[in-house]
Image (cartoon, rainbow, N blue to C red):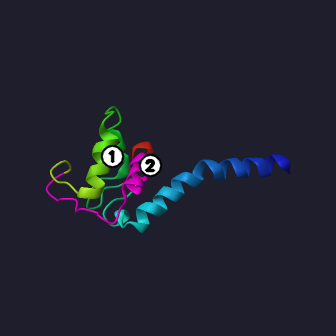
């Protein structure tokens, strides 16, 4: 019984941050144009993570794009600015996106 409870607690603690950041992405309307594993209007978060996997400057650049928007990187549809997203929330979102496998 203790083993099963420990396994359940371990599983929840490992997956909870992913759900928390997906909840943040949903609350900031990011999921209206993006999905974790498929292209919608914008690229999937897995594709973003793959593209920037070896780029050490990517996190700061992506935080700026989350807040200010951008265009041209993923095609002709521009990403609008998101001034309602704080820098702290943008950093959380970008860290989650770049950790997506």
Q: Identify the residue at horizontal 45%, vertical 62% (top origin).
A: 24
Q: CA distance from mark 2 to mark 1?
A: 13 Å
Residue 73: percent from the left, percent from the top? 19, 47
Q: Which residue is mark 1?
A: 47
Q: Residues within 10 Å of mark 2 (few under 14, many from 20)?
A: some
Q: Is residue 90 above or below residue 51?
A: below
Q: Identify the residue at horizontal 34%, vertical 42% (top origin).
A: 59
Name the quadrant of the C terminus: top left
Position of 54 compared to 72: left or right? Answer: right
> Which type of secondary structure does the marked residue at label 2 adopt?
helix
Find residue 96 and name its label. Answer: 2
Position of 87 compared to 5: left or right? Answer: left
Question: Residue 85's image quarter?
Answer: bottom left
Residue 83: percent from the left, percent from the top? 29, 64
Q: Residues within 10 Å of mark 1 (few under 14, many from 20)?
A: some
| Highlighted magenta segment, given as a residue range | 75-97
Residue 14: percent from the left, percent from the top? 61, 47
Q: Nearer the viewer, residue 81 or 17?
A: 81
Q: Is residue 51 above or below residue 36?
A: above
């Amino acid at each position: 019984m203790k083993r099963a409870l420990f396994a359940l607690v371990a599983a929840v603690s490992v997956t909870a941050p992913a759900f928390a950041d997906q909840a943040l992405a949903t609350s900031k309307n990011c999921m209206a144009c993006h999905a974790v594993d498929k292209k919608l209007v914008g690229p999937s978060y897995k594709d973003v993570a793959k593209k920037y996997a070896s780029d050490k400057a990517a996190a700061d650049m992506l935080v700026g794009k989350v807040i200010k928007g951008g265009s041209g990187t993923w095609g002709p549809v521009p990403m609008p600015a998101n001034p309602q997203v704080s820098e702290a929330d943008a950093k959380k979102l970008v860290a989650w996106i770049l950790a997506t496998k």
